Amino acid sequence: MFVVIFRATVRQFDVAYAETAAQMRELALTRFGCLAFHAVTEGDQEIALSYWPDEASIRAWKQQADHRMAQQLGRERWYASYSVEVASISRRYDSPAG
């Protein structure tokens, strides 16, 4: 399993951002093999973690046309700066529910 770690300094968010983010999340989860997606914004800092079964799925997602348009809008409108890291998860632990 792999994780993509997206960190950004937010310039501004608007209604278009919220709509685009929801569409991209749904597309990644339903058509590109994303296993889970979590994002948190605090002040002007955002971090998003997306989990993927393999690097091929990540590459396919990166090249998807709607996602590329969202990336461009992010650079132009929503983010002052950002970074992306891709890491392999070698071990995972869970505690029992309850």
Image (cartoon, helix red, strand yellow):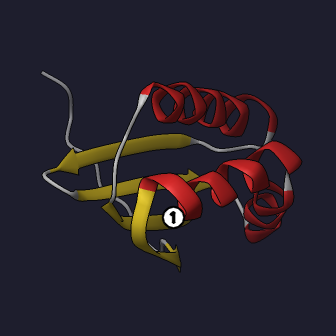
**Which residue appears at 40% of the width and 33% of the height?**
14
**Which residue appears at 48% of the width and 42% of the height?**
37
Up-down: is 42 above or below 27?
A: below
Rendered location of residue 16, percent (x, y): 53, 29
| Residue 1 is at least partly visible in this image | no
| Residue bearing the label numbered 1 | 3
**Which residue appears at 20% of the width and 57% of the height?**
44
Q: For this view, does 61 lie left or right of residue 17?
A: right
Rendered location of residue 42, percent (x, y): 15, 50
Residue 96 quadrant = top left
| Residue 88 is at least partly visible in this image | yes
Q: For this view, does 90 lie left or right of residue 75?
A: left
The residue nearer to you, when weighing 35 against 93, is: 35
The residue nearer to you, when weighing 20 against 12, is: 12
Up-down: is 84 above or below 68?
A: below
Q: For this view, does 15 lie left or right of residue 71?
A: left
Q: Circle 1 sits in a helix, a strand or a loop, which is it?
A: strand
The residue nearer to you, when weighing 4 against 94, is: 4
Residue 46 quadrant = bottom left
* Tag 1: amino acid: Val
